Amino acid sequence: MRKKEWAFYLFAALFIFGGQFLAHRDLVTGTPPPIVQTTLAGETALHPLGTRPALIYFWAEWCGVCRSMQNSVTQVGKDHPLATVAIRSGDDAKLQSYLRDKNLDWPVVNDNGGEIGQRYGVKAVPALFFTDRNGSILFATAGYTSEWGIRARLWLAGWF
């Protein structure tokens, strides 16, 4: 490989990884900020967390990337505790209608004003937070993540 090609690939890698760092640097790790709102079903939002690796998923009804991840999140939610937060997706009735239309049986907290997302450092959706068996956030990411990517992070969280 020539020096110019090598330099180009090095620059491209640094640009991509640097962008990932900048995009994710504000996402919370450690103790999750409390979510005092209940889910649309009236349950405590973070109740399923703290017994084994779990996923906290921030999404929006209007988000195309979130729609492309719906099946992956649903499948992971069958095997791992799941808490979801819908950001700026309308009132409870609109959100329940959306969930019903898409056949999504998720525990959802409606964060129509975006306050919960702000406490978690979410600037864009989808955003995913991976907790260990003690309920601490070990990993956080924003943007599309495949089902295997979600499962791999949850598997890693099981080792801590």
Image (cartoon, helix red, strand yellow):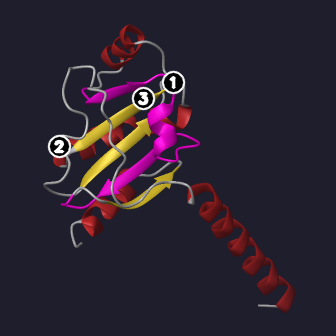
Height in image: 78 above or below 107? below
Q: CA distance from mark 2 to mark 1?
A: 24 Å
Q: CA distance from mark 3 to mark 2?
A: 17 Å
Q: Residue at x 81, y 84 (%)?
A: 7
- Chain-order first, disc 1 or disc 3: 3
Q: CA distance from mark 1 to mark 3?
A: 10 Å
Mark drawn on residue 113: 1
Given the image, on which type of amino acid does mark 1 rest? Gly
Determine crowd level at label 3: few under 14, some 14-19, many 20+ residues with C-alpha closer than 10 A. Answer: many
The residue singled out by tag 2 in the image is 48
Q: Residue at x 30, y 15 (%)?
A: 100
| Front residue (pair 70, 154) | 154
What stretch of residues is rendered in magenta?
105-134
Q: Are marks 3 and 2 in contact (CB under 8 Å)?
A: no
- Coordinates of residue 115 in the picture (x, y in percent): 49, 32
Whether residue 126 is visible? no
Given the image, on which type of amino acid does mark 3 rest? Ala
Whether residue 102 is visible? yes
- Chain-order first, disc 3 or disc 2: 2
Mark drawn on residue 86: 3
- Does the magenta segment cover residue 126? yes
Given the image, on which type of amino acid does mark 2 rest? Pro
- Coordinates of residue 54 in the picture (x, y in percent): 25, 52
